[in-house]
């Protein structure tokens, strides 16, 4: 099942420009995530003094963000069809008064390389809309420790984003470098480097450096990140001279997860707090997510699998009390 | 007389404090005020997540 969602804009953060929105990957088709840092109740390790790999830098706040519902506006119909065990196509139709309506055709190709029970490589994902705008990414595991990804985005016939990044996963650290929109002729581009080190089995710390160059202008931004993983919670903090982001994820039970996030915009001009929860009811094949934030926005999504049919129904509504705006959405995912 | 003045002014001081607190919390023009309030909301959210989420939603209803 694929749940297509629209990315939520961050408040003026320059780091948001470094992250190119890529087509979503179906479950099982992405790069294999490494297990979280070992905790006291985690699995036994061969040597107690071996620090685990801290995972990807982007995953520091990911657990909290996954709890929040994603807004669906209008009507969305998604049809997934697996043509073989390597190749899948999907058709997406969206009708909305607030977003661009249209049709998108997407494909997913998974290679024969296998890194785990449900982890394959290389992975090629792409989708194109009716105007010819393309989103594509290629993910490949070069060696056991080196992973690479290439992303392309076009708006009709114009390239908007081209990005290449490489990640190296050591025994107890992760390092990555990415080049976004490099243009030798225009002397512009962006280089992003991440480094995350396991300090203890539960604590990981690192840094994030962004260097942006444009004709006649260059700037760099450094931020520090720390993540602490407990038995049933994850706290993360990103401190930069231009923005601050803090998140707390708590797994109350098998059915209830909560997340709290504090985000500030560039140069601390604005800030917001978001509180969300996710309720899973497997007995009813139902998942409910709710969110409320300090900008007086309240929203929720409900996703229900209509077994035995290969259908998932998605209902979404968001209400902005401050701006007196209400958005609702309805989606059906087939396959 | 002084006691009655204290008693008479206490509710007005409380209401004035409540009014000033409300104006402070809802004034969105001051980004430092925004950050301070949001830090407090973040701390409150973490406290709620850690302390008020230990109930089983699917537990059977008590038989009366």
Image: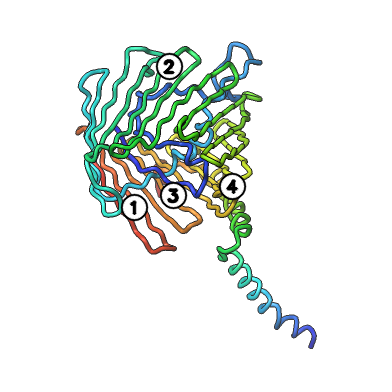
Q: Label 2: which residue? A: A141
Tell me the distance, in whole angstroms, between the alpha carbons under discs 1 and 3. Answer: 11 Å
Q: Is residue A119 above or below residue B17?
A: above
- Which tag is nearer the camera, tag 3 or tag 4? 3
Q: Label 3: which residue? A: A291
Which chain is disc 1 placed on? A
Q: Nearer the viewer, residue B45 or A239?
A: A239
Q: Label 1: which residue? A: A317
Tell me the distance, in whole angstroms, between the alpha carbons under discs 3 and 4. Answer: 17 Å
- Which tag is nearer the camera, tag 2 or tag 4? 2
Q: Secondary structure at mark 3?
A: strand
The number of numbered discs placed on residues in the rendered structure image is: 4
- Which tag is nearer the camera, tag 3 or tag 2? 2
Q: Are marks 2 and 4 in contact (CB under 8 Å)?
A: no
Q: Label 4: which residue? A: B47
Rendered location of residue B34, percent (x, y): 59, 58
Q: Residue at x 66, y 79 (%)?
A: B12
């Amino acid at each position: 099942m694929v749940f297509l969602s629209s990315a939520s804009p961050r408040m003026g953060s320059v780091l948001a420009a470094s992250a190119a929105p890529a087509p979503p990957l179906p479950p099982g088709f992405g790069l294999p995530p490494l297990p979280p840092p070992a905790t006291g109740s985690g699995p036994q390790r061969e040597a107690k003094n071996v620090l685990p790999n801290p995972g990807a830098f982007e995953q520091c706040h990911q657990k909290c963000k996954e709890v929040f519902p994603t807004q669906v506006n209008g009507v969305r119909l998604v049809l997934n069809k697996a043509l073989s065990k390597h190749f899948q196509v999907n058709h997406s139709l969206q009708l909305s008064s607030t977003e661009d309506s249209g049709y998108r055709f997407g494909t997913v190709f998974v290679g024969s390389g296998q890194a785990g029970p449900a982890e394959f490589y290389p992975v090629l994902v792409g989708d194109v809309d009716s105007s010819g705008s393309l989103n594509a990414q290629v993910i490949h595991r070069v060696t056991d420790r080196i992973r690479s990804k290439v992303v392309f985005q076009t708006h009709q016939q114009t390239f908007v984003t081209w990005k290449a990044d490489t990640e190296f996963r050591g025994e107890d650290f992760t390092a990555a470098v990415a080049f976004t929109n490099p243009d030798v002729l225009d002397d512009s581009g962006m280089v992003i480097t991440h480094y995350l080190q396991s300090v203890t089995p539960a604590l990981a710390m690192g840094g994030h450096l962004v260097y942006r160059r444009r004709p006649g202008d260059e700037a760099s931004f450094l931020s520090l990140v720390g993540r602490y993983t407990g038995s049933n919670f994850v706290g993360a903090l990103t401190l930069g001279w231009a923005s601050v982001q803090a998140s707390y994820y708590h797994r109350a039970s098998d059915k209830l997860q909560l997340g709290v996030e504090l985000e500030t915009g560039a140069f601390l001009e604005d800030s917001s707090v978001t509180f969300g929860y996710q309720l899973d009811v497997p007995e009813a094949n139902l998942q409910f997510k709710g969110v409320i934030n300090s900008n007086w926005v309240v929203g929720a999504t409900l996703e229900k699998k209509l077994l035995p049919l290969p259908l998932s129904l998605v209902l979404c509504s968001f209400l902005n009390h401050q701006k007196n705006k209400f958005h609702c959405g309805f989606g059906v995912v087939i396959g | 007389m002084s006691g009655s003045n204290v008693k008479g002014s206490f509710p007005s001081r409380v209401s004035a404090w409540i009014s000033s607190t409300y104006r402070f919390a809802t004034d969105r023009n001051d980004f430092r005020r925004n950050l301070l309030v949001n830090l407090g909301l973040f701390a409150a959210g973490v406290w709620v997540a850690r302390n008020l989420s230990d109930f089983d939603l699917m537990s059977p209803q008590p038989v009366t």
